[in-house]
Image (cartoon, grey):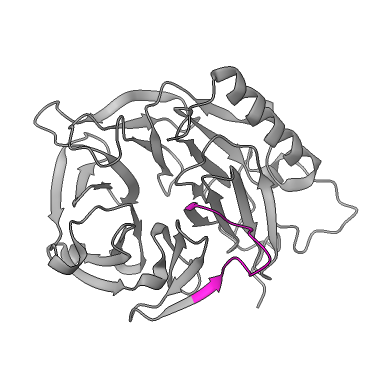
């Protein structure tokens, strides 16, 4: 296990990465970032689709331990903690061992917790549903890593150790179906649904792959390390901005990559202390990054695409997510056809 950096190292590392971003890599200035401390092995960081509140999962111990001490932190629209332990294992009959992936669907916050997917009311913290998964003898026990919401309210949950991804249908009493079990998944960690194709995107922990899975379970490798290159090591999180650019986090190399719509890769931040399951707040154009070993997290503005903007026109804070983003009907950031 890696040794957690000190708080001084954390500030230095974050400043270094953000300084590089100021030089053109696409994240806002340090003074405009919200930093969250006092967490315990944070794994996933998600925002309400309306951009009004945020949630962070805290493993608080070993990632596979049934210790019932995991918790969920709730933040307000500015990234300030409103309840450090909004949902807490061992309190009010709540069972929450090692919460990892999170997904918000309407009023329900879904949490991947070992062999169960649990849904809580995002306002009251009350448990609404517990979804159990079948345990095929050929694949051993279930241990969920991430969860993502797709079109029509469908949910997708990854099991990294078992090279398996499940599909859950809340409209059918949260029925669980196997979407794909394939060794080519190579430890599927983070999952997200592509906003244009509605295909599932998974990132590989073991071999640094980015994979696409159709609703029928057909697998395509989008990107991987080449014979002479080792761009990725242990990919942890994946998400998309409102314009269709993909962001992936490399837990071990401490980098966040952006893949643009024309398939170009850019490092937008590096020297980060174990960035885990990142996500994008599309409403406010922010990236949400949990730092697993540093027990902290960060919200930061993303640079908006410059499509349709004359080069001579000066960028403003709107391009970095700190005032309302451009309307979808405008030319700024319009998707290419």
Q: Image height check: is 44 above or below 164? A: above
Q: Image height check: is 46 above or below 208? A: above
- For the residue pair 289 and 184, the one nearer the viewer reads as 184
User: Residue 162 lies in what quarter of the image?
Assistant: bottom left
- For the residue pair 181 and 288, the one nearer the viewer reads as 181
Name the side, left or right, on which 31 lies relative to 164. Answer: right
Residue in the picture at 70% in, 63% down: 331
Name the side, left or right, on which 121 lies relative to 251. Answer: left
Q: In terms of secondary structure, what is the magenta stretch mainly?
A: loop
Q: Residues in magenta? A: 221-236
- For the residue pair 329 and 265, the one nearer the viewer reads as 265
Residue 54 in sight here: no
Residue in the picture at 64% in, 29% down: 13
Q: Image height check: is 260 above or below 14? A: below
The C terminus is located in which quarter? bottom right
User: Residue 32 lies in what quarter of the image?
Assistant: top right
Residue in the picture at 52% in, 60% down: 208
- For the residue pair 309 and 258, the one nearer the viewer reads as 258
* Picture coordinates of residue 262, whole percent (x, y): 68, 71
Is residue 224 located in the magenta-colored stretch of the structure?
yes
Extreme residue toward the right, this view? 312
Name the side, left or right, on which 43 lies relative to 222. Answer: left
Residue 5 in sight here: yes
Residue in the picture at 69% in, 35% down: 18
Q: Image height check: is 207 above or below 336? A: above
* Picture coordinates of residue 36, whole percent (x, y): 48, 26
* Picture coordinates of residue 271, whole percent (x, y): 64, 37
Is residue 59 located in the magenta-colored stretch of the structure?
no
């Amino acid at each position: 296990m890696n040794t957690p950096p000190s708080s001084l190292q954390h500030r230095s590392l974050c400043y270094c990465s953000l300084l590089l971003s100021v030089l053109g890599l696409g994240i806002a200035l340090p003074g405009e970032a919200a930093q969250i401390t006092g967490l315990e092995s944070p794994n996933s960081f998600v925002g309400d689709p309306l951009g009004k509140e945020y949630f962070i999962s805290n493993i608080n111990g070993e990632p596979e331990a049934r210790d019932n001490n995991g918790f969920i932190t709730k933040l307000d629209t500015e990234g300030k903690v409103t309840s450090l332990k909004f949902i807490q294992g061992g309190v009010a009959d709540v069972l929450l061992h090692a919460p990892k992936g999170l997904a918000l669907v309407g009023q329900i916050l879904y949490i991947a917790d070992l062999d169960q997917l649990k849904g809580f009311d995002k306002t009251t913290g009350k448990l609404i549903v517990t979804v159990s998964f079948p345990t095929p003898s050929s694949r051993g026990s279930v241990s969920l890593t991430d969860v993502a919401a797709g079109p029509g309210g469908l949910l997708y949950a990854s099991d990294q150790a078992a090279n398996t991804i499940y599909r859950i249908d809340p409209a059918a009493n949260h029925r669980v179906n196997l979407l794909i079990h394939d060794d080519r998944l190579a430890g599927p960690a983070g999952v997200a649904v592509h906003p244009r194709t509605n295909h599932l995107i998974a990132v590989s922990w073991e071999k640094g792959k980015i994979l696409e899975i159709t609703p029928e379970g057909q697998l395509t490798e989008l990107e991987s390390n080449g014979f002479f290159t080792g761009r990725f090591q242990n990919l942890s999180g994946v998400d998309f901005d409102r314009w269709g650019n993909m962001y992936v986090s490399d837990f071990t190399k401490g980098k966040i990559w952006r893949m643009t719509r024309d398939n170009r890769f850019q490092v937008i931040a590096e020297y980060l202390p174990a960035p885990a399951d990142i996500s994008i707040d599309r409403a406010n154009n922010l990236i949400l990054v949990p730092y697993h070993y540093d027990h902290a997290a960060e919200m930061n503005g993303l640079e908006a695409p410059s499509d349709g903007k004359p080069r001579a026109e000066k960028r403003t804070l709107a391009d970095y997510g700190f005032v309302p983003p451009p309307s979808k009907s405008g030319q700024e950031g319009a998707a290419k056809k």
